[in-house]
Amino acid sequence: MPVRNLILVAFVEPVAEGLVFLRSDWPLHITLVRFDVGATDGANPADRLAVLAEAPAGAALGARLTVGGDAGFGRNGSVPVSLIEPQPDLQTLHEQLVAVVGSLGGKVLTPAHTLSGYRPHVSHHGDKRLYPGDVVVLDRIALVDMAPDGDRTVRRVLRLWGRGETAGAKNPRR
């Protein structure tokens, strides 16, 4: 099986397992860790990862996150983002998921922005964004395929861990 480009995120908009969306039309989310991983022992790496990520994801569900100030990420700060204030449960989740990826021989694609360099944020998407002081609940953690069936123009939610029927962060200004 070829190398898979996957990402673990915390969605702050409601999504469903199996959702396919354009790479240019992501629902609002916090990236937890982005990585490449190949097959281990002939097993599908996404399936193995989903099993190993179950406990850390489940433990983090329900954490309350506060939106901090705005910032610019990417080349020349051209990507507007809303920073997420430091929160121990979110940092622990990130670190545990990085360890899970490492245990499968995965390669983290942004090592400088991992572990002590992790800066959780939500990128703005047109008019969709979070505002300083907003509070969101960590209630949708997902494993997303960055090129399902080799198609790099779309993304697919492979696995979703959530809380309750109405899981999804609340953004009062949307």
Image (spheres, helix red, strand yellow):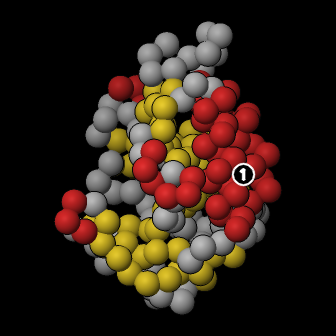
Instruction: From the top left corner, tell me how far across and down residue 9 is, in percent.
Output: 54, 53
On-image quarter of the C terminus: bottom left
Answer with the quarter of the image where residue 155 lies.
top left
Instruction: From the top left corner, tell me how far across and down residue 16 is, in percent.
Output: 58, 52
Instruction: From the top left corner, tell me how far across and down residue 78 is, in percent.
Output: 22, 68
Callout 1, which amino acid?
Ala
Query: Residue at 31% of width from left, 35% of height from top?
Result: 152
Front residue of 106/139: it is 106
Query: Residue at 69% of width from left, 47% of height from top?
Result: 96
150 in relation to 94, above or below? above
Query: Residue at 29% of width from left, 40% of height from top?
Result: 153
49 in relation to 23, above or below? above
Answer with the quarter of the image where residue 162 lies.
bottom right
Q: Secondary structure at mark 1?
A: helix
Q: Is residue 75 left or right of residue 47?
A: left
93 in relation to 110, above or below? below
52 in relation to 110, above or below? above
Instruction: From the top left corner, tell me how far across and down residue 136 is, in percent.
Output: 61, 76
Can residue 125 be seen here? The reply is no
Query: Residue at 75% of width from left, 49% of height from top?
Result: 56
Front residue of 31/117: it is 117
Q: Is residue 9 left or right of residue 54?
A: left
Q: Residue furthest top?
A: 42
Front residue of 140/49: it is 49
Which residue is denoted by mark 1 in the rendering? Answer: 57
Front residue of 164/50: it is 50
Can residue 39 be seen here? The reply is yes
Q: Residues within 10 Å of mark 1 (few under 14, many from 20)?
A: many
